[in-house]
Image (cartoon, helix red, strand yellow):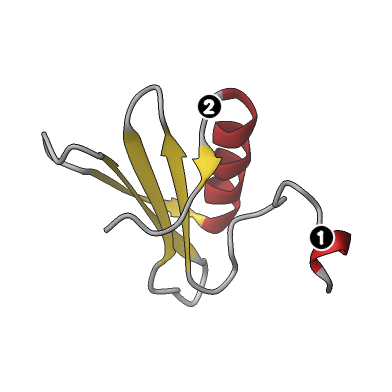
Amino acid sequence: MPNKDRPLVDRHAPKNGVGWLYNPQMRQVCRFQNDMPTAHAQWVEVETRSVSGQGQPVVRRMLRHNAIEAWETMQKSGGWKRCTPKW
């Protein structure tokens, strides 16, 4: 799909791979990465950490549909923007 035909906002986190969000106000990055699927569910690992490297990262595992919902909510109401990989 040519760039001119692509939507300005991605609707979902990447299906294969890693997606990154950055919040300049909180100075934090959040990484969404597919985790080991089980026979019953697909999991996503969500890691949030400070850009300055202070403090411990917060790592959570979510079901894929919950991670997609979190991705969309963070972009709509939380000031998070897509970014390139940070670490």
Marks 2 and 1, Cα distance to the nearest angstrom? 22 Å
Left or right: residue 10 compared with residue 44: right
x, y (%) of residue 75?
59, 35
Q: Nearer the viewer, residue 55 or 35?
A: 55
Circle 2: element type: loop
Q: Tell me the quarter of the picture where residue 56 sits.
A: top left
Q: Mark 2 points at which residue?
A: 79
Residue located 47% across and 45% down the image? 21
Given the current orientation, which residue lies at the most extreme front position? 4
Q: Residue at x 85, y 61 (%)?
A: 4
Residue 24 place in picture, x, y as percent: 41, 29
Which labelled disc corresponds to residue 6?
Answer: 1
Residue depicted at 26% across the width and 58% down the height: 87
Please state, as top left, top right, bottom left or bottom right, where the N terminus lies in the image.
bottom right
Tell me the kind of residue under disc 2.
Answer: Gly
Mark 1 Cα-neighbour bin, 10 Å: few <14, some 14–19, many ≥20: few
**Residue 71 % position (x, y):** 56, 43
Q: Are the residues at dot 2 and dot 1 in contact (C-beta closer than 8 Å)?
A: no
